[in-house]
Image (cartoon, coloured by chain):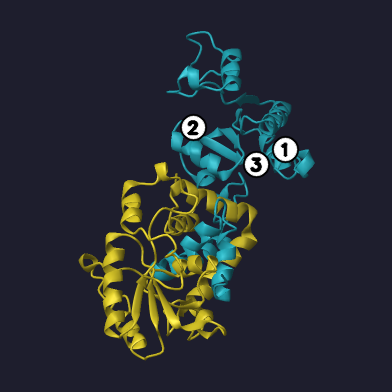
Chain colours: A yellow, B cyan
Amino acid sequence: MRFPPRLEQLLQTLRRLPGVGPKTAQRMAFHLLERDREGAGALAAALQGALQYIGRCRSCRMLAEGELCSLCTAAGRDRTTVCVVESPADVGAVEESASYRGLYFVLHGRLSPLDGIGPAELGLDGLAGRLGSGEFREVIIATSATVEGEATAAYVAAVARACGLRATRIAHGVPIGGELEYVDGTTLARAIAGRVAVGDTDPETPR
Amino acid sequence: MRFPPRLEQLLQTLRRLPGVGPKTAQRMAFHLLERDREGAGALAAALQGALQYIGRCRSCRMLAEGELCSLCTAAGRDRTTVCVVESPADVGAVEESASYRGLYFVLHGRLSPLDGIGPAELGLDGLAGRLGSGEFREVIIATSATVEGEATAAYVAAVARACGLRATRIAHGVPIGGELEYVDGTTLARAIAGRVAVGDTDPETPR
């Protein structure tokens, strides 16, 4: 059925959210209009505030409110290491792991020539400039373990080596707590190919 | 990790949507900010437009942009029958079934004295006034088949009978296409208790 035009408009725009189909959009719209009008107003205001003020950090391309993000300006971070990731969500994931205290560089995608995504679109010229400044020692490449992610990793590694820096790739293999029999073959093959001599796994000295 | 304040704000407000947890909110926020800023603006505008202009129809309490909803003002509907439902989504579902051409009355809930929801909160005094006007012949009660839905149905039926109208309840039983062995026991018990003599199922003459 046709709902009032502004309700239809709301349903249409809610469906632009990832993972939201017609039924979910209806549920969300009715919830907001019937039970949480205050929430609807807050969401509209938050969207506008985010659109107006959130851009990319000039240095690492992370989402930021000012010129620089809170990670680039934070005191006490290791400014000789940069971790290259594909998305702001990946920065969140690495930070959650509490295993890394260096800086980041966010590509906002991965190399995909067929889709017109080349090094320029990923800000890799800017990264090359930053790496060439002499402040860094190591580039940790944490792009995803897909064909495009690996291609991107190879490109970033070449850029890093051209600047005379050590390029490392995060390890891929069997997840911690994962039972071998349920791990997919590709991951297991990678884990076997990437095996390390027992006693060689000190994270401070990557191979 | 802490994202910029306005991004945190957006994540918080997205989580007010039904079925949206922290991960989904992050996915939505990043999608909007990175890939669909136009969609984010459209959503903010649609939310504000809906909040400002969408209220309840004066006659049937359906969501409407003006005084009356499109169903109450539509030509060619049967104005002697009213179908009582719990929510605007239910109106959508009945309309989709294309099996009903009368008017509606939306309760926006069901009787639940423990939660402070009595007849007044459901607009049942307004319904009584409308039913007493003499324009109706039949009240079809399509509240849900829950304890509270049945209590609400009984109340609405009493109101209808007090106005000298025929009150009917939609049939409950085995869904069409449903295989008997997979139907839950309560539904099956209801289907057996509500069995009809073969040949008696003409929908125009409810028992």
**Is tag 2's residue or tag 1's residue first in the polypeptide sequence?**
2
- Residue B63 placement (x, y as % from top left): 57, 50
Q: Nearer the viewer, residue A67 or B77?
A: A67
Examine the rendered structure and indicate whether residue B159 appears above or below residue B71: above
Residue furthest bottom in the image: A133
* Residue type at the position of mark 3: Leu
- Residue A198 placement (x, y as % from top left): 42, 59
C-alpha gap between disc 2 and disc 1: 25 Å
C-alpha gap between disc 1 and disc 3: 9 Å
Callout count: 3
Q: Is residue B40 visible?
A: no
Q: Residues within 10 Å of mark 2 (few under 14, many from 20)?
A: some
For the residues carrying marks 2 and 3, which lies nearer the camera in this image?
3
* SS for dot 1: loop
* Residue type at the position of mark 1: Leu
Question: What residue is shown with label 1?
Answer: B111
The answer to whether marks 2 and 1 sit on the same chain is yes
Q: Quadrant of the C terminus of chain B?
A: top right
* SS for dot 2: loop
Residue furthest left in the image: A114
- Residue B154 placement (x, y as % from top left): 70, 28
Question: What residue is shown with label 3?
Answer: B107
* SS for dot 3: loop
- Residue A206 placement (x, y as % from top left): 40, 71
| Circles 1, 3 touching at the beta carbon (< 8 Å) | no
For the residues carrying marks 1 and 3, which lies nearer the camera in this image?
1
Question: What residue is shown with label 2?
Answer: B100
The answer to whether marks 1 and 3 sit on the same chain is yes
Q: Which residue does the image show at 60% across and 16% down from the upper left?
A: B189
